[in-house]
Image (cartoon, grey):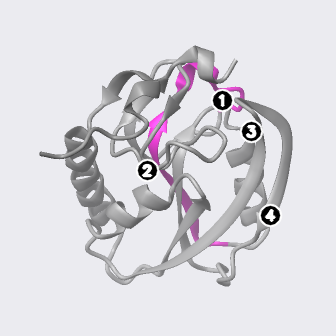
């Protein structure tokens, strides 16, 4: 018998199960495979750290040649976006003339992603598309930022798990859950 996850006691409710996540990732992999040609030069750009698990699982469902790269971008202080975007680690691949598929864990206000997209556009990629595991459209400030490939729409609740964290904890939960409010207030 498997032991209960150490963070289970901190979760108010599970809103997306591990099984639902894996099923949707397979579907997203098919959608992405169909959206590109085999000859496309695709750079899967993972936004660290939250999107690592999603990119790892998603990449195995995409039947195309891809190259991985990573950016570490920060705009959060505690539980909300500060509005100030810092590039902690920039990508290493030259993306000029290449198709970039940004892999994001959650689209919230859109401020960070807008900043990243504007930066990437200066490097003249052939295209920029976004695949996100979660989308919180209620919180969107940057209305023109939207996902080309969206896993799940979630309510405006503080969610953790499957890569999403609070103070670097909860990333290794296999599902998406709502964190108990008393833990982050």
User: Which image quarter is the C terminus in?
Assistant: top right
Label 4 sits on a secondary structure element that is strand
> Relative to the observer, which residue lies in front, 133 or 40?
133
- Residue pointed to by mark 3: 111
Helix, strand or loop under label 3: helix
Answer whether residue 106 is magenta in the image. no
- Depth check, mark 2 against mark 1: the one in front is 2
Classify mark 2: helix, strand or loop: loop
Direction from residue 107 to residue 132 in the image, left or right: left
Does the CB distance between marks 4 and 3 fall below 8 Å? no
Q: Nearer the viewer, mark 3 or mark 1?
A: 3
Q: Are marks 4 and 2 in contact (CB under 8 Å)?
A: no
Quadrant for residue 93, please give it: bottom right
- In the image, 114: left or right of 9? right
**Disc 4 versus disc 3: nearer the observer:** 4
Q: Is residue 131 visible?
A: yes
Can you identify the residue that label 2 sits on?
Answer: 172
Neighbours of disc 1 within 10 Å: few (<14), some (14-19), many (20+): few
N-terminal-most mark, 2 or 1: 1
Closer to us: mark 4 or mark 2? 2
Q: CA distance from mark 4 to mark 3?
A: 16 Å
Magenta region, residue range: 125-143
Helix, strand or loop at mark 1: loop
The residue at the point 62 percent across, 47 percent down is 168
* The disc label shown at residue 143, or none: 1
Q: Position of residue 130 (x, y in %)?
A: 52, 52
Which mark is drawn over residue 88? 4
Among numbered discs 4 and 1, the one appearing first in the sequence: 4
Mark 3 neighbour density, 10 Å: few (under 14) some (14–19) many (20 or more): many
């Amino acid at each position: 018998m498997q032991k209960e996850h150490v963070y289970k006691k901190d979760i108010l409710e599970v809103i997306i199960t591990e099984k639902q996540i894996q099923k949707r990732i397979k579907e997203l992999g098919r959608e992405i495979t169909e959206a590109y040609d085999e000859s496309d030069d695709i750079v899967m750009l993972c936004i660290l750290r939250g999107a690592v698990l999603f990119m790892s699982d998603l990449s195995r469902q995409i039947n195309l040649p891809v190259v991985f790269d990573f950016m570490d971008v920060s705009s959060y202080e505690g539980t909300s976006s500060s509005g100030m975007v810092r590039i902690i680690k920039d990508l290493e691949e030259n993306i000029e003339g290449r198709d970039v598929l940004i892999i994001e864990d959650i689209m919230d206000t859109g401020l960070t992603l807008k900043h990243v997209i504007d930066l990437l556009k200066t490097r003249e990629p052939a295209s920029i598309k976004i695949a996100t595991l979660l989308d919180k459209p209620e919180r969107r400030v940057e209305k023109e930022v939207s996902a080309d490939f969206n896993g799940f729409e979630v309510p405006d609740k503080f969610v953790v798990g499957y890569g999403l964290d609070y103070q670097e904890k909860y990333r290794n939960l296999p599902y998406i859950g709502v964190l108990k409010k008393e833990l982050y207030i």
